[in-house]
Structure formats: structure tokens, C-alpha cells
């Protein structure tokens, strides 16, 4: 059974059920919101180029710094203030310096920092090395100057003084130096390479964000100004500056655009240990064969060139994928309308017929057929749902309204009233005489409003065709034509079984069952309610009298 159900499910397709609102107002709102979403999707696709396949940039950097400065009676050129860096895509420009000249490997007093100050030889441990020391202690305490004694060390003497760098900086005029940055980039996916230097480059140009945004020659002072830093202040202790080159390339022929955009910012923290400095030495041989050196503690600005960016080219698959993922945004229009209807439903507008009808159409509640019954009254335009168990007669039990569909009797299970009318005159006499003498109820029943019902003991059998007093539906011409007409019922039976013997002794059972279905189809609007639809007592007995059982033994309100 389970395998058959699985195989059957493979040949079925279930779609979502929608409620269509025929309204100019809500239709206009939907069109407006849908158009807004569609326009937004188009704008996002175009602005963010979601129709392109994207590749990350690969790059290489070359730099060339130029400039000459004269300070402290000395010429500083590129060979002196530009020191090669070990970092990738970086260059260093020296701005300040502390020199310790004529150092020899000797024994001399340590620079007087707190742990090096002593009062006697006991304060100095032979062979000891402090993290801030310039050499190895010899175990002696000697005079550093006339007032201070420090531990003697074996080091490059005289030792470097731990003083602050000169302020103003020695090479403060280096802000007028320039640097040429050559940046080659490559997009592997598209096999496309480009250089940041324009073909018609004016070699005398200098980068300016407004007037010369593509010039690859930068003045150092302008770089710090763009980074919102003061060159003279930063030159004292140095620092780290990032030169950012962003490539956002559109490689499509019809919208080609591929040029760098430059940005500048400071990388080191100005509040916590700011600056950038390191030491190096130059060594010399003296005539006596001893080695001498000059120690340089240099401060400067390290420029890190950071290259990033992407390149894009049209790709149909990317377009379909991105547009497809954004199609769900059209659900926002539906959500907005649903929210507006919900707000209107919760406000005073909910009293209107539109909101009541919408609420009934929007939700379809599926109940257990064994726990519900459906009834229809001739003087009410709707079907009523009754939940079990019953505490009183079915006629007096309150229920909820269920929307029913209009019926057209042109299907196999029904007939057209005009067709039945042709034989109405011929059958009226037979129908009248087919009724048993007890067709009408001589006793008054509390739950009967038409006067045609029969007494019943069970609550679920106590149902009339009317809610209020009035003529019985069985006296109407349509009941005779649609439900009791033998001609109509014969046609319906032959439609299903063309070889059915209408003279069979048991044909009344089939006619009676079909009459029940005709009544349900007529009064309830659908065969879907057939199993739980209750036929009123008056109608049920009218059908039974017209097409009785041979033994007159009926099962109750069920369509026996």
C-alpha cells in the first residue's frame, strides 16, 4: 500500500491555492508594488553589476622615491634617506636620525637607565645582561659622568644615548619628496593586464584628488595631508602610512571602465607607542686593524602600498542566478497587501462585506468528517457546519457558516431543469400516486417548521428543510424536477452505466441513492459534502415514499 502511494505521488503535482480579489484598488496597489520591486531589482543589478562574473586582482608594485634635502650642513639624497625594506610592497623614507659615531668594541660605563645605576661593585653582576643593556656587565661600578655611576659593560663604546629624537626632525623637508608608484594588475579569469600609468602621462604631474586623480606621482606631504596627518609632527618619531589602490573594473566593451582609485590612512596607533624606527650600522677598518662603526638610529615613515579590487565581465549564468535569487522579493508586494488587509480587518472596516467574504475565502479548514455534519435550509443562502456531539435536535443546534459554490446541473450526475420539464406533465400523476398515504405528518413536531417531517428519536435525524416556518421544499416544482423526476434519474443512471436494466426489481435502491445525491448537489453546491450532508426529514421521507425499499426498513438519516 505504501509503495503504491509513493508511486502515485510521482505522477501528481500539487500547487498552492490562491484567493483572487477582483478589486481595482487592491489590483492597483499590487501593480504599483510589483513595479516598484521590479524597478528596484533592475537598479540593483545594474548598479552593483550583478550580471557579471567577477575575478580578484593580482598585482605587483614598484616604487621610486626622488628628492634632495640640505640640512645640518649636509646633502641628503635618495641613497641616504631611502632604505630598502624587507616588507613586501613597502618603501621607507627617513625623517629623523640619532648618530653614535666612532664606536669601538671596548669596556665602558653603561648608559644610566634605572637598572644600570650602581653605588658599588656589589650592585653589578659579572656576565649579567639586561634587556635594555648595550653589552655584558664586567662586575665593576664606574663613573658615567661626574655625578652618576653605572655598571661597566663590554660593548660598542661609547654606548648609544637613550635620548628622545630631535624635534623638529632632521629631514622635515622630506615632505617635498615625490614617489612614483608603478602598479601592474592582472585578472587571470579574463587574461587581462593593465598598468596604473596612463599612456599620455605628463611626467611633471603630481597627484591631486580633484585635478589629477590618475597621476601615479605622489608628493609625500600630500599623502599625509590626505591621511589627515601633520607631516612635521609625524616626522619626529615616524609612523606607518597605507597607500590604498582600489581597482573596480568593468571589462565589458560597451561599458568599459578600469582605472585606479587612491586612498590614504595611518596604520600605527597615535596613542599607544606611535612611530616607526630601527637601527643599522656602518663599519670601517682602522689602520691598526681594529673595526670601528657608526650607529644610526633612524626614524621615518614606512609606506605600505595595499592593492585590492575586482574585475567583472558579462556572464549570462551569473545574471540568471542573481535575478532568480531576487525574484523572491516580489513576495514583499503580496506581504504588504496581506498586511494592509489584515490592518483593515482589525480596524473598524472589518464590518464591511468584503472583509467578511475575504476571511471565509482565505482559509479552508479541514475537519474530521466523523465529527461534523453539514445542513442546508431553504430559507438561508448558505450551508451550516454542525460539530458533534449533539446536545439537542440538529434543527436547534447552532453552527458556523460554510461558503458553498453555485451549481450548474449539466454534469453526469445532474440534469438540466428544462429537460426534466418536458416530461413533467407525464410524471406528475405517477409521482402523486407513488406517495404512501402517510406522506404528511399529522402530529406537531417542535423541531419541524414545514409540517412535512416525520417523528424521529435520534437528535441527528431531527432536521427540517427550513429554519423558520413556511412551505416545505418538497412542494416546490424544482424539487420535483431535480430530485424526484424519474426521467432525470434514469438518464443519470444510464449515463454511468448505458446497459443498466431499468426494469430490475432493485432499481428503486439506485434511484433512491441517486435522488439523495441530486438533493445534496442542488442544496449544498458540491458532491464534496455528500458523505456528511444531512438530508432533512421531510425530503428524506419524500424520496423514500417515491422510491421505497421492498421491506420498508431504513437505516435513519444516512443515505442507505
Image (cartoon, rainbow, N blue to C red):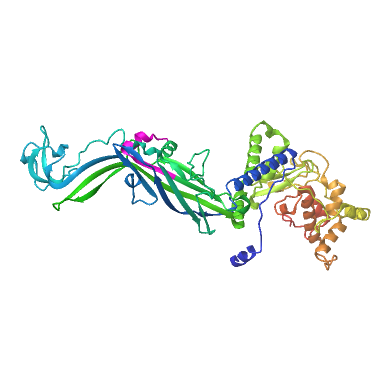
Residue 418 percent location from the top left of the image: 90, 52
Residue 287 percent location from the top left of the image: 15, 51
- Return the residue nearer the eye: 501 or 346: 346
Residue 490 percent location from the top left of the image: 85, 61
Check residue 34 for magenta coloring.
Answer: no
- Return the residue nearer the eye: 73 or 457: 73
- Return the residue nearer the eye: 123 or 506: 123
Query: From where the camera sits, is residue 67 visible?
Result: yes
Magenta residues? 228-243
Which residue is located at x 45 percent, y 45 percent?
Answer: 244
- 106 sits to left or right of 460: left
Q: Quadrant of residue 70?
A: top left
Q: Decide: is 113 above or below 523.
A: above
- Return the residue nearer the eye: 438 or 108: 108
Check residue 240 for magenta coloring.
Answer: yes
- 153 sits to left or right of 243: left
Considering the image in quadrants, where does the C terminus appear? bottom right
Query: From where the camera sits, is residue 397 visible?
Result: no
- 382 sits to left or right of 42: right
Q: Decide: is 375 above or below 73.
A: below
- Number of marks in picture: 0
Residue 32 percent location from the top left of the image: 69, 40
Amino acid at each position: 500500500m505504501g509503495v503504491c502511494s509513493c508511486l502515485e505521488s510521482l505522477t501528481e503535482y500539487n500547487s498552492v491555492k490562491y484567493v483572487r480579489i477582483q478589486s481595482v484598488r487592491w489590483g492597483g496597489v499590487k501593480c504599483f508594488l510589483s513595479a516598484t520591486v521590479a524597478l528596484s531589482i533592475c537598479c540593483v543589478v545594474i548598479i552593483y553589476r550583478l550580471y557579471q562574473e567577477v575575478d580578484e586582482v593580482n598585482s605587483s608594485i614598484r616604487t621610486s622615491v626622488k628628492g634632495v634635502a640640505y640640512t645640518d650642513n649636509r646633502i641628503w639624497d635618495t641613497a641616504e634617506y631611502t632604505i630598502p625594506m624587507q616588507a613586501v610592497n613597502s618603501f621607507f623614507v627617513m625623517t629623523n636620525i640619532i648618530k653614535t659615531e666612532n664606536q669601538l668594541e671596548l669596556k665602558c660605563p653603561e648608559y644610566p637607565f634605572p637598572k644600570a645605576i650602581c653605588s658599588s661593585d656589589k650592585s653589578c653582576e659579572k656576565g649579567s645582561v639586561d634587556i635594555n643593556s648595550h653589552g655584558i656587565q664586567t662586575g665593576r661600578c664606574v663613573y658615567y659622568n661626574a655625578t652618576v655611576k653605572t655598571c661597566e659593560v663590554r660593548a660598542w663604546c661609547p654606548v648609544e644615548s637613550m635620548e628622545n629624537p630631535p624635534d623638529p626632525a632632521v629631514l622635515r623637508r622630506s615632505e617635498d619628496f615625490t614617489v612614483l608608484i608603478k602598479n601592474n594588475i592582472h585578472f587571470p579569469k579574463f587574461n587581462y593586464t593593465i598598468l596604473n600609468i596612463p599612456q599620455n602621462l605628463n611626467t611633471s604631474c603630481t597627484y591631486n584628488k580633484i585635478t589629477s586623480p590618475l597621476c601615479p606621482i605622489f608628493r609625500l606631504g600630500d599623502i599625509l595631508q590626505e591621511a589627515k596627518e601633520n607631516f612635521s609632527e609625524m616626522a619626529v618619531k615616524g609612523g606607518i602610512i597605507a597607500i590604498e589602490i582600489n581597482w573596480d573594473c568593468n571589462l565589458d566593451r560597451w561599458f568599459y571602465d578600469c582605472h585606479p582609485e587612491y586612498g590614504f590612512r595611518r596604520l600605527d596607533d597615535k596613542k599607544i607607542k606611535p612611530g616607526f624606527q630601527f637601527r643599522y650600522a656602518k663599519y670601517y677598518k682602522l689602520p691598526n686593524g681594529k673595526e670601528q662603526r657608526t650607529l644610526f638610529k633612524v626614524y621615518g615613515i614606512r609606506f605600505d602600498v595595499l592593492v585590492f579590487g575586482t574585475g567583472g565581465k558579462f556572464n549570462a549564468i551569473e545574471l540568471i542566478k542573481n535575478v532568480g535569487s531576487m525574484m523572491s522579493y516580489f513576495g514583499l508586494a503580496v506581504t504588504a497587501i496581506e498586511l494592509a488587509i489584515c490592518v483593515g480587518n482589525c480596524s473598524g472596516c472589518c464590518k464591511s462585506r468584503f472583509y467578511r467574504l475575504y476571511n471565509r475565502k482565505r482559509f479552508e479548514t479541514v475537519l474530521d468528517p466523523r465529527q461534523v455534519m453539514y445542513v442546508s435550509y431553504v430559507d438561508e443562502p448558505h450551508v451550516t457546519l454542525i460539530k458533534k456531539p449533539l446536545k439537542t435536535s440538529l434543527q436547534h443546534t447552532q453552527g458556523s457558516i460554510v461558503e458553498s459554490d453555485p451549481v450548474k446541473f449539466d454534469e453526469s450526475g445532474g440534469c438540466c431543469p428544462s429537460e426534466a420539464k418536458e416530461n413533467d406533465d407525464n410524471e406528475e400523476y405517477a409521482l402523486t400516486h407513488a406517495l404512501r398515504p402517510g406522506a404528511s405528518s399529522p402530529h406537531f413536531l417542535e423541531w419541524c417548521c414545514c409540517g412535512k417531517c416525520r417523528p424521529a428519536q435520534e437528535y441527528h435525524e431531527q432536521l427540517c428543510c427550513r429554519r423558520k416556518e413556511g412551505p416545505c421544499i418538497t412542494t416546490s416544482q424544482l424539487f420535483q424536477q431535480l430530485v424526484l423526476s424519474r426521467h432525470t434519474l434514469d438518464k443519470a443512471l444510464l449515463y454511468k452505466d448505458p446497459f443498466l436494466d431499468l426494469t430490475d426489481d432493485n432499481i428503486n435502491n439506485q434511484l433512491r441513492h441517486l435522488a439523495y445525491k441530486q438533493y445534496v448537489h442542488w442544496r449544498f453546491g458540491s458532491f464534496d459534502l455528500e458523505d456528511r450532508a444531512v438530508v432533512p426529514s421531510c425530503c428524506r421521507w419524500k424520496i423514500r415514499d417515491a422510491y421505497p425499499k421492498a421491506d420498508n426498513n431504513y437505516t435513519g438519516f444516512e443515505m442507505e
